Image: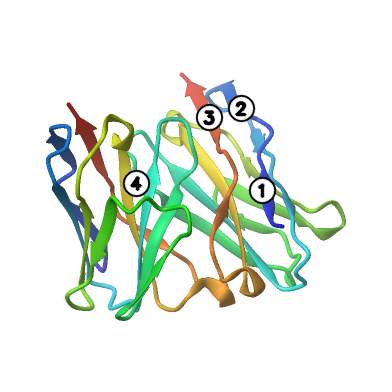
Amino acid sequence: AQKVTQAQTEISVVEKEDVTLDCVYETRDTTYYLFWYKQPPSGELVFLIRRNSFDEQNEISGRYSWNFQKSTSSFNFTITASQVVDSAVYFCALSSYNQGGKLIFGQGTELSVKP
Amino acid sequence: DAMVIQNPRYQVTQFGKPVTLSCSQTLNHNVMYWYQQKSSQAPKLLFHYYDKDFNNEADTPDNFQSRRPNTSFCFLDIRSPGLGDAAMYLCATSSRLGGQGETQYFGPGTRLLVL
């Protein structure tokens, strides 16, 4: 069975702090894909990144960075120098061919960045 | 810009009164999805269309139906809304089924209130 766990339900930081959102996944498939989505208060799910299981390179995009470690089945997301506009719920998700390609979401982490 | 559009953004209906939510896309994607998201929960897949092929999730109630008259449009019909159907309804699209890690792109959602 596939599962995504985001153990942090809520995180609160002060602007300019760095913050890491944890994501741990379970799958028996060797080929799988990991995603992060951002859901601001307006409700739209905004795609942030996709990673396949064969690409363990970390990625940086501006203030955002992602650390994929197959050895610990984790795909963590770090925001550097957080801003108030980063306040949102962040979802980690998993899909694989053998599971019909469905997106399996974690429960989400609500990030609150205070000025 | 290519995008996923949902109308209306807010919908109020009465208990038992049929309601239709709409989704359109300019991405020319083959797959369209409908998700239900209740407060503080992850999105839950209701069904999806791959072209004209309809795929219902096993636990989607019969009260929920969908139509896809053409590539660009997809509708969610709730035949007899109950109080428990109050939620955010998200439409998403992808170019292919997710088995090869296709990214799903989401619309802004329709927030349904049942009185």
| 1 and 2 marks in contact (CB < 8 Å) | no
Disc with the residue nearer the chain's start (3 vs 1): 1
For badge 1, the amino acid type reads Val
Disc with the residue nearer the chain's start (4 vs 1): 1
Q: Taking A80 as reference, is A72 left or right?
A: right
The location of residue A57, given as percent across then percent down, is: 74, 65
| 3 and 4 marks in contact (CB < 8 Å) | no
Image height of A33 relative to B62, above or below: below
| 4 and 2 marks in contact (CB < 8 Å) | no
> Local crowd at mark 1 within 10 Å, few (<14), some, or many (≥20)?
many
Image height of B101 relative to B65, above or below: below
Residue on which disc 2 sits: A17
Residue on which disc 4 sits: A44
Q: Nearer the viewer, residue B44 or A37?
A: B44
Quarter of the image that includes the C terminus of chain B? top left
Do dots 4 and 2 share one subunit? Answer: yes
The location of residue B15, given as percent across then percent down, is: 17, 32
Image height of B83 relative to B67, above or below: above
Disc with the residue nearer the chain's start (2 vs 3): 2
Residue occupying the point 45% across, 60% down: B57
For badge 3, the amino acid type reads Leu
> Local crowd at mark 2 within 10 Å, few (<14), some, or many (≥20)?
few
Q: CA distance from mark 4 to mark 1?
A: 21 Å
Q: Nearer the viewer, mark 3 or mark 4?
A: 4
Question: In which quadrant of the rendered view does residue B12 lie?
Answer: top left
Residue occupying the point 58% across, 22% down: A13
Q: Secondary structure at mark 4?
A: loop
Residue on which disc 1 sits: A4
Do dots 4 and 1 share one subunit? Answer: yes
Tell which subunit mark 3 falls on: A
